[in-house]
Amino acid sequence: MPASSQIGLSEARRQGERPPALEIRDVVASYVEGRRVLPVLGGISLAVEEGEFVAVVGPSGSGKSTLLDVIAGLIAPESGEIRLDGQPLAEQDRLGRSAYMRQRDLLLPWRTALDNAALALEVAGVPRREARERARARLPEFGLEAFADAYPAQLSGGMRQRVAFLRTVLAGRPLLLLDEPFGALDALTRVAIQDWLVELLERERRTVLLVTHDVDEAIYLADRVVVLTPRPARIAHVEPVTTPRPRHRPFLTSPEFVAHKARILAALGFLDDGGGDR
Amino acid sequence: MTTELPPLETDQDRPLRVLPAPSRLALVRQRLAPVVLLIAVLAVWEIWVRWDNTPRWFLPPPSVIARTLVNDRALLAENAWVTLREILLGFVVALVAGVSSAIAIHASRLLERALYPILVASQAIPIVALAPLLLIWFGHGLTPKIIVTALVAFFPITVNVVDGLRSADRELLNLLRALGAGRWARFRLVTFPTALPYLFSGARIGIAVAVIGAVFGELVGAEAGLGHLLTLSAANLRTDRVFACVAILAALAVCLFSLVAVLERLVLPWRRFLVAAQPDA
């Protein structure tokens, strides 16, 4: 097994700082499909520091989304443990602790952009009027001020995804779980929204775990890129990206970027030059 | 390196273009088409009956029916009010019972397994055939009419709402769960709003069959109501009045149906955009 476990954890201990925001310990999980039980996660251990941005890449169907479902508390792992801020928590107790965002914007079609953005606050028990006021105050920075009263069906894909982002951010949870949030967007919109996320994270530091199948996106955004093996997923490789954030477009064509990409692709098995650790 | 914000407005982000509203004339023409057809049919009817000298008791011309509508207006209105009351009371009972049962079926696996298949199958039963039984049990009054009306309207409403509750997006429900929403919050925020359009579909069918239910209830045995008046008039060969009753019933049904449709538009304003707009085309 590669030296993938407990990365980041040892560092935090050495510095005597707070425990990692998220710690995944030996998580094994399966997906039940009718009577077939598919092993999906074959023992994953990973620690994410507070304010850190970790991207998870892997072959499709490698259980990336399942990992996020487990962390969010939607799925019970067969074994292993999830700690948030150092506390081991059962599934039930993890619900409501993170802000989850998926590839589909999952907006409520009967709510306006504003009311959709306020949804997470309402779920958290904020009175409707106050939730709307708080959401309204942040519409401009999401480029949505002119569309507060528009229904999702009236908005473009990029705008809908920004509403979903606003909802996620307003949830006020320090941990963001992003499952391919740019996946359904066209290339141009995707680039614009990635840069916009970079900017957003500069303003308010959050801990982010991003699942993606886009290696470029992972390197561009993350402090560390975790590469998963095919199912049942284990960690094949962890690629630290030390270039300080926020990064900008020229980074995408820099030699460091290409070197990172080569190592990640090798770990994914796309290159045969022995760059990975298997 | 610059830290300027990337432009947020990509090509995709422009609001959807709004097409010019269809001209008034075009709208009027569209609305008028069925009216013109109806007038044409009535005209042919009128001319045919007069030319053929058809006996009045067999088929009166529309002009005679219209005169009856005016002359008998007090009698017709009195009976129409009775029938309308039966329809509305029966429909409200069906609505309350239907939505409650649907929610119960949705909430309980046992009820879903046991009751739902029976409900679906029972839609094939002609409920109106129960009317004679209700006459035996409840007599000639208002109660048996309300029961028949409620019964026929109950099934389409229940079945539609159950389908609606079932069709709530699982991923969306999971998202709310991940946000910490409990069972009630998920129901209130996602499941029930998802079912609302289905509820309205059910209600539209429900109100239409409620009219049939009420009339049938009266046909079997009643002391008042359009169905009752219709039976009496037919027995006396007052065919013109039978037609007058039918005309009022038809108008009643159309009005009630439209009322539900208008209510649907008011309650579900977002539905319009689903058909009109297809972003990301």
Image: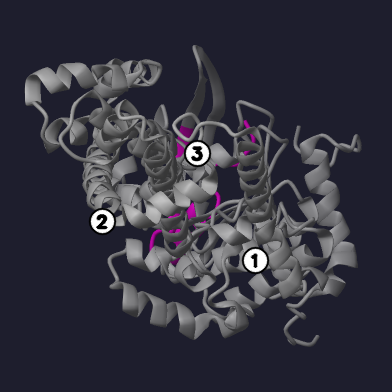
Q: Which mark is residue B74?
A: 2
- Nearer the camera: disc 2 or disc 3: 3
Residue A224 visible within the image: yes
Which secondary structure lies at badge 1? helix
| Amino acid of disc 3 | Pro
User: Where is mark 1, residue-wise?
Assistant: A154
Whether labels 3 and 1 belong to a single chain: the reply is no
Q: Is residue B108 left or right of residue B160?
A: left
* Residue B209 in the image, given as x and y percentages of width and height: 38, 35
Residue B179 visible within the image: no
Q: Is residue A273 above or below residue B32?
A: above
- The residues bearing labels 3 and 1 have C-alpha atoms spaced at a distance of 54 Å
Chain letter of the residue beneath label 1 in the structure image: A
Which secondary structure lies at badge 2? helix
Query: Which residue is located at x 77 percent, y 66 percent?
Result: A189
* Residue B199 in the image, given as x and y percentages of width and height: 40, 44
User: Where is mark 3, residue-wise?
Assistant: B60
